[in-house]
Amino acid sequence: MPLFSVLIDAVAAMRELKRTFEPDPAQAAVLAELGGCDGIVVQLRRDRKYIRDRDLYMLKGVVKTKLTVEMPPIDDIINRMLEVKPWMVTLVADHADSDSPVSTIDFTAAPVDFRDVTARFLAVGVNVCFFVEPEPEQIKSAAKAGASAVLINCSGFTGALTLDDAQTELDRIDRAVQAASKNDLEIHCGRGIHYKNIIPLLELGHVDEFIIGHAICSRALLIGMERSVRDMAELLRMPIQST
């Protein structure tokens, strides 16, 4: 059975609406773990717009499963993560414009020596993942950079407007998953995954972990975080129907 982690940035975004101290991402993380998730994920941006440095230390202290931080490979954030030492960092593309959405690493264009960055984290016991498009060449580049995992961008599939487009994107993800498996990488899938569209991804097999944020956090507004996470955990435990 694959694992799943909860991306709780939506909680921090709600806090930002009033520029106050609640809701607290650390409290949301505790409730998510009580609901049965296998990890907590947050995104640390250049401008700290949602998750703040203080949140990282609070989360490191309360998370009992594993804490993953998605981050751009810039010096001040790298140094902060070397101090916090989460279970894993997931490297994402750096954008000078902090309002730009988090996007994938393009190894053919990125001006960063990722082998050096990876080595620095591995030296202090932090696992390294890369957020990549579902392309075998990007997967292979992540492996060459020393990654232990890849987070495959599933937004093409989860945002598809037709069945044909969804199948095309699902096939792309399948090829990427196969490439990651051949390169001995742990396989994570995320972006836009919810309680219904996760089923075809489960049927692919080989996915080690799903990263799910908005679907769980929005459902939590109605029924609570613990119940929302438990519902997802139960869905992942259901046997896959063979066709």
Image (spheres, rainbow, N blue to C red):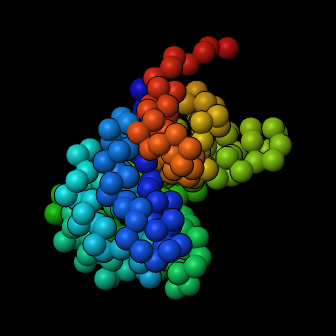
From the viewer's perspective, tell me whether residue 114 is left or right of residue 192: left
From the viewer's perspective, tell me whether residue 66 is left or right of residue 223: left
Residue 162 visible in the shown view: yes
Which of the 4 quarters of the picture holds residue 240?
top right
Which of the 4 quarters of the picture holds residue 227?
top left
Q: Residue furthest left?
A: 124
Which of the 4 quarters of the picture holds residue 242?
top right
Residue occupying image coordinates x 76% and y 48%? 160
Q: Is residue 50 above or below residue 150?
A: below
| Residue sitting nearer the eye, 117 or 98 | 98
Q: Residue furthest bottom?
A: 96
Q: Quadrant of the N terminus?
A: top left
Q: Quadrant of the C terminus?
A: top right
Residue occupying image coordinates x 50% and y 20%? 238
**In the rendering, at what x and y percent does residue 104 appear?**
54, 64
Residue occupying image coordinates x 19% and y 58%? 61
Residue 71 visible in the shown view: no
**In the rendering, at what x and y percent does residue 99 appear?**
58, 79
Q: How many marks?
A: 0
**In the rendering, at what x and y percent does residue 149 appear?**
38, 50
Q: Residue furthest top?
A: 242
| Residue sitting nearer the eye, 139 or 97 | 97
Q: Is residue 236 above or below residue 28?
A: above
Residue occupying image coordinates x 59% and y 76%? 100
**In the rendering, at what x and y percent does residue 130 appear?**
43, 59
Q: Is residue 166 above or below residue 16?
A: above
